[in-house]
Amino acid sequence: MAILITGGTGFLGTALIDSMLKQGHKVYSVSRHAPEPRERLAPLRGDILVPDFGLREILVHANITAVYHLAAIARLGKDNDGSIWRTNVEGTKNVIDVCLRYQIPHLL
């Protein structure tokens, strides 16, 4: 199974990638700072704030069956510059749009 993980360089994303690779899955990890490539891991530098994460050509051919959306800004306080809203709300909307556009049946 091919899986796409957003936020793959974070604490949870790193653990999830390790788990999915151990289970034999092909993993695509989308983040602003892509992790080092490994067997069955395709690190992708992308941005959830951009339609198709800026990765349309890859998404068209990847046959992804599940997306684990872990990318977020997790800090407390005022959102003075709007980055929390953009990432956590608009970014999530883009993830949903990708799942619908590429008929990815599972979003977690």
Image: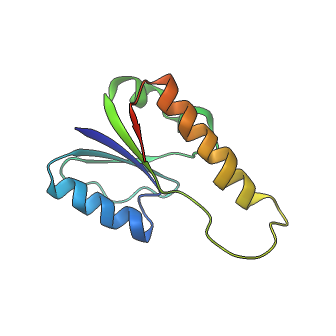
Of the pair 6 and 66, the residue shown nearer to us: 66
- Total numbered circles: 0
Residue ID at (74%, 55%): 85
Q: Is residue 102 above or below residue 72?
A: above
Q: How is the image coloured?
A: rainbow
Residue shown at the point (51%, 45%) measured from the top left: 46
Residue 42 x, y percent position in the rendering: 31, 46
Residue 21 in the figure: left or right of residue 81:
left
Q: Residue at x 40, y 23 (%)?
A: 60
Quadrant where the N terminus is found in the figure = top left
Looking at the image, which residue sits at the far right?
80
Quarter assignment of residue 36 = bottom left
Is residue 79 shown above or below 57? below
What residue appears at the point 32 percent right and 34 percent down from the top-left corner? 65
The answer to whether residue 79 is left or right of residue 27 is right
On screen, residue 22 versus residue 30, left or right, reads left
Q: Position of residue 17 (x, y in %)?
A: 30, 58
Q: Is residue 60 above or below residue 80?
A: above
- As displayed, is residue 64 above or below residue 11? above
Residue 38: % across, % down: 22, 55
User: In terms of depth relative to the viewer, which is nearer, 99 or 21?
Assistant: 99
Give the camera-side residue of 94 and 46. 94
